[in-house]
Image (tube, rainbow, N blue to C red):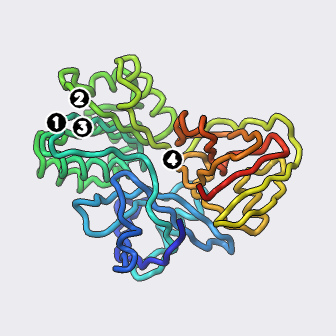
């Protein structure tokens, strides 16, 4: 995986704090930038004299939309999101990594399912890609969306949702909930609760799939409600944009030598107690693959060939992958002196 310079073809202001960026893909890169609904792009910028990478979910559909598009919402103290929403213009060039991500599902025109989506704030971004693609590919399936926001003015893709309701009629249903709505709002208020989730689901549907993306607390509540309803774990799909969990301390806080294989070359690095393997590799002058540095996107996935490693967080690897020795190197710390990590597998 590597970065390519892409020209920004469109900048659309979606809300006062969010923009949608579309990219022009040269013919020579068409194959590399084929993507699945629900995946993300990693963008690289020089901001304040420092190289910064951020992962942003693709909100366009690979079967409906012509241009690949991501949506970016400005966040407090977010120097990259502030740069994008305030400074980026059409015609600018951005370094973009090829699409990645597992927050997706195989679709079949013969399916007759009900897809339930729960989104919070900017967590709607990957859900939008999945929703548009599902409605287009599976004409017998239905899609329902429960979308939480602060108020009516912070809704992303409001006009697109209106168009989807018109285009697909009863096959697409959306329900909004606001934590601080204006006095005119008569719908759901507050935060998403298990009762709201239970009322959102239609028990008469035979085949259901559930997708969620948003704050950790919201997703924990939704997951608990689904589990209490007997929903199989394989039918629950989650994407996290970050984590609020406290970092776990290393068992023995000492600097350790770690051998890594990166782009066909072996390097020996020193990982200090306050560092992860990715952080140490970057300090040593290498360019390991990474994006979020929160353990959520899996861009930094690598395999432990020998030694003992512990991850602070893991929001994307399966239990099977962990059992096979895979780690998220952006949250991984060595616990022994014989650690060898292969990024090239």
Q: In the shown orientation, is residue 158 left or right of residue 6?
A: left
Q: Are marks 1 and 2 in contact (CB under 8 Å)?
A: yes
Q: In which quarter of the image is the C terminus?
A: bottom right
- In the picture of the structure, the residue carrying the numbered disc 2 is 207
State which mark lies toward you, 1 or 3: 1
Q: In the shown orientation, is residue 264 left or right of residue 203?
A: right
Q: Position of residue 286 (x, y in %)?
A: 72, 67
Q: Are marks 1 and 4 in contact (CB under 8 Å)?
A: no
Q: Cα distance, mark 3 to mark 2?
A: 13 Å
Q: Where is residue 131 in the image (x, y as percent from the top left)?
A: 27, 47
At 24% from the left edge and 52% from the top edge, which residue is drawn?
132
State which mark lies toward you, 3 or 2: 2
Using the image, tell me which numbered label, if any, was put on residue 112: 1
Q: Cα distance, mark 1 to mark 3?
A: 14 Å
State which mark lies toward you, 1 or 4: 1
Residue 190 lies in quadrant: top left
């Amino acid at each position: 995986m590597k970065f390519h310079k892409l020209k920004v073809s469109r900048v659309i202001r979606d809300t006062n704090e969010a923009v949608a960026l579309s990219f022009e893909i040269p013919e020579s890169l068409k194959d590399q930038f084929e993507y699945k609904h629900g995946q993300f792009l990693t963008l690289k910028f020089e901001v304040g004299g420092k190289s910064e990478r951020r992962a942003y979910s693709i909100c366009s559909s690979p079967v409906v939309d012509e241009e690949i598009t991501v949506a970016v919402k400005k966040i407090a103290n977010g120097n990259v999101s502030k740069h994008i929403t305030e400074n980026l213009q059409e015609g600018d060039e951005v370094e973009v990594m090829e699409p990645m991500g597992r927050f997706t599902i195989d679709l079949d025109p013969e399916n007759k399912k009900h897809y339930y989506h729960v989104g919070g704030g900017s967590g709607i971004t990957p859900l939008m890609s999945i929703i548009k693609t599902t409605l287009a590919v599976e004409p017998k399936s239905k899609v329902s969306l429960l979308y939480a926001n602060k108020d009516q003015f912070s809704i992303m893709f409001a006009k697109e949702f209106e168009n989807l309701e018109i285009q697909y009629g009863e096959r697409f249903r959306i329900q909004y909930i606001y934590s601080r709505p204006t006095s005119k709002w008569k719908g759901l208020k507050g935060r998403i609760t298990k009762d709201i989730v239970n009322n959102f689901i239609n028990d008469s549907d035979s085949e259901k799939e559930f997708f969620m993306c948003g704050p950790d607390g919201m997703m924990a509540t939704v997951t608990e409600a689904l589990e209490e309803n007997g929903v199989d774990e394989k039918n629950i799909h989650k994407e996290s944009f970050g984590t609020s969990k406290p970092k776990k301390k290393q068992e023995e806080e000492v600097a350790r030598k770690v051998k890594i294989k990166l782009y066909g070359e072996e390097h020996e690095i020193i990982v200090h107690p306050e560092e992860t393997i990715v952080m140490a590799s970057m300090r040593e002058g290498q360019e390991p693959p990474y994006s979020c540095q929160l353990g959520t996107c899996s861009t930094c996935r690598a395999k432990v060939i020998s030694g003992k490693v512990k991850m602070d967080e893991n929001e994307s690897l399966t239990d099977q992958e962990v059992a096979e020795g895979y780690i998220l190197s952006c949250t991984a710390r060595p616990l022994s002196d014989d650690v060898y990590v292969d990024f090239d597998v």
